[in-house]
Amino acid sequence: MLRLHSHAFYLYSAIVGLAIREALVGAGRHIFIPLPPAAASASAYSTLAPWQIHLEAFRLVLFLFTISCFYFGCGLYFEKVHIHSEALVNPRAGTDRPEETATTGNKKSYGLDFGMGLIHFLIFFAWAIAITDHSRYSWGVSPFLVFLTAIFLYDLVWLVVSARLDSVEEIKLWAWVCAFFWFIGAVVFFGVRAWKNDVVAEEACYFVFYFYLCGDVIELFSGKPFFLKWILKALPSHVAGSLN
């Protein structure tokens, strides 16, 4: 499994790398290479207003922050659910001896998890393309916000398709945490939009996701529960016990 996993994760890395390249080439050329007025008037820059470049900068930072956290989190998930657990139930895995079949009743599916993760990162690639798209749908929602919604609510889909597997225990908390912060972000967006414009509302809602991602980084690199600690304090004791 370890040998298969190392090759499988190369595909994730390739998609993530291409998505980051798309984001940097698309928005980076507007943000990092300012042109003088004379040169800008003769190029595609003439179609971009200062607020558009400012918005793309916000989007680029959020995209890079999010894809990094989700990529690291995905690696930790596979390490814990598949690689580490296999080593515990099958200490002969990775040696020249035949693998033994685990009899612990631990139901999991590497293929399902890999497929769901692959789709998730493909959505990230589409999200990277949307960074420079300034069109709007109904209610002032941009394509970038549509893909942001898909990214943060995707774990709920993963949760549903994994309902019969033991790995659902590792998915459920973060699925609901992501959904919660997406909901708060939506409330901020429509609340600010009621008295400001679409662009200000979009930039304001990004700070909700920045806060979430900062907490995620703390958990990833310190190993200490950040969100879980506050969630358990806020929930009734019998509910908190089921999550802990």
Image (cartoon, helix red, strand yellow):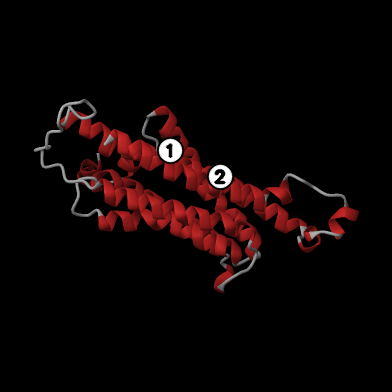
Q: Is 113 rendered above or below residue 141?
A: above
- Picture coordinates of residue 125, whole percent (x, y): 51, 54
Query: Considering only order in the chain, which callout, 2 or 1, is on the residue closer to the N terminus?
Result: 2
Q: Residue lying furthest bottom in this view? A: 138
Q: Residue lying furthest left in this view? A: 103
Q: Is residue 69 left or right of residue 207?
A: left
- Pointer 1 local density, CA inside 10 Å: few below 14, some 14–19, many at least 20: few
Q: Which image quadrant is residue 49 in?
A: bottom right
- Picture coordinates of residue 131, whole percent (x, y): 61, 56
- Pointer 2 local density, CA inside 10 Å: few below 14, some 14–19, many at least 20: some
Q: Measure the alpha-carbon separation of dots 1 and 2.
A: 12 Å
Q: Residue lying furthest right in this view? A: 38
Q: Residue at x 17, y 27 (%)?
A: 92
Q: Residue at x 43, y 38 (%)?
A: 72
- Picture coordinates of residue 10, whole percent (x, y): 42, 40
Which of the labelled discs sits on residue 72, or is there none?
1
Whether residue 227 is visible to the viewer of this picture, yes or no, is: no
Q: Residue at x 46, y 59 (%)?
A: 149
**Quarter that holds the N terminus:** top left
- Picture coordinates of residue 165, whole percent (x, y): 20, 50
Along the line of sight, the residue nearer the viewer: 236 or 5: 5
Q: Is residue 141 left or right of residue 118?
A: right
What residue type is disc 1 on?
A: Phe
What residue type is disc 2 on?
A: Leu
Residue, disc 2: 64
Along the line of sight, the residue nearer the viewer: 10 or 220: 10
Along the line of sight, the residue nearer the viewer: 70 or 121: 121
**Quarter that holds the C terminus:** top left
Q: Is residue 24 left or right of residue 214?
A: right
Mark 2 lies on a secondary structure that is helix
Which of the labelled discs sits on residue 219, or is there none?
none
Whether residue 8 is visible to the viewer of this picture, yes or no, is: yes
